[in-house]
Image (cartoon, rainbow, N blue to C red):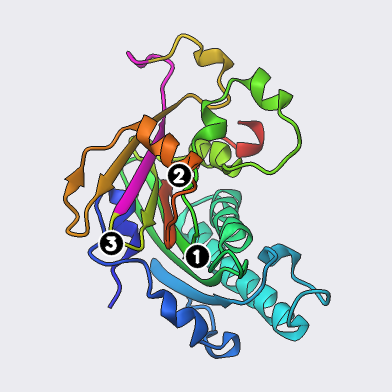
Amino acid sequence: MVSSMLSTARGELPKTSAFDLSAATNVKLEDIWSEPALQLQHGELWISYPFEERYDGLDHKSRHPDLATVAKTQIDLHLTSIVDQAVSFGMRDFTVRWAAGELLTNATQYGALSEMNAAAGLIRLEWRLDRDETGPMFAVAVANPCIRLFDPSRFARMESVDFFAMENSSTNGHLFTIGLLSYLKENTKLTYLWEMANGERMKLTMERIPEDAPDRPANYDELMKPTRVEVFKFDPSNQPIPYSFEEFQQDVANGVGTESVTISCVVSDGENPRDA
């Protein structure tokens, strides 16, 4: 039995991992699809994913071309169903489509079962619609296999001049994080939770730094996205282990291995990430 992944969006640790990776080799793609549920405020989708390319690039040139066509069609069908329900709940189409779509795209692009198998294998998406006195909100979490630790805050913490001076090469960070931070509901965080083979967990949270924040950095206006970053480490019993951001960066540099990552957040209708 797996826990709800959305507990991470509330700042809690789930009781179990997002999924059992052994299922990735036991589930056939054509057996997992069902018709998108209608008129739900909460749902989840499991995707068996044997492809090395991201889902929006699936076509007749893909490995297993027939299944690739089915996969892309079904993922788009489910995503559209989620968006339609969110819109009927009061959310903007673009907010939900961009947030859920980008998380799925990155899971299919960067997820990998092993060094020898670049396919994501298994992806899980969970979502919930809710509202409070500020209006409707959309909580979403996506989990995928992940073979090593990475720093999703890297680009947000960079000064713009350094970012645009970078050479066009492979990077260890997620550019879409900058846009996703623009949509975070006020007083919520973007959370990354890694499961380790030894049962330990690592967590990184990110939140926007307001212009009037007392901890506003001196180079606030030069940063790609002024962001407050915190890292945590837990033993197999979910007890905290002393851990610093410097240690996290060293672990990233050393390519510390992981089994999976869950990314979660709560978004509301904020600024457009294309303008962020």
Closer to the camera in the image, 35 or 131: 35
Residue 72 position, x and y percent, is 68, 73
User: Which of the two labelled residues, at mark 2 and mark 3, occupies the earlier sequence position?
Assistant: 3
Q: CA distance from mark 1 to mark 3?
A: 37 Å
Depth-wise, is mark 2 or mark 1 nearer the camera? 2
Gap between marks 2 and 3 measured at Cα: 34 Å
Q: Is residue 173 visible?
A: yes
Residue 215 or 193: which is nearer the viewer?
Answer: 193
Residue, x 64% and y 69% (percent of image)? 76
Element under disc 3: loop
The range drawn in magenta is 201-215
Question: Which residue matches tag 2?
Answer: 268
**Label 3, residues with CA under 10 Å away: few <14, some 14-19, many ≥20:** some
**Residue 23 horizontal/vertical position (percent):** 44, 81
- Dot 2 or dot 1: first in sequence order is 1
| Residue 39 visible in the displayed image | no
- The residue that label 1 is drawn on is 85
Which residue is rendered at x = 43% and y = 36% of the image?
Answer: 250
Residue shown at 52%/35% (left/top)? 182
Q: Which mark is residue 222?
A: none
Badge 2 element: loop
In the current view of this chain or complex, which residue is farthest to the right? 61
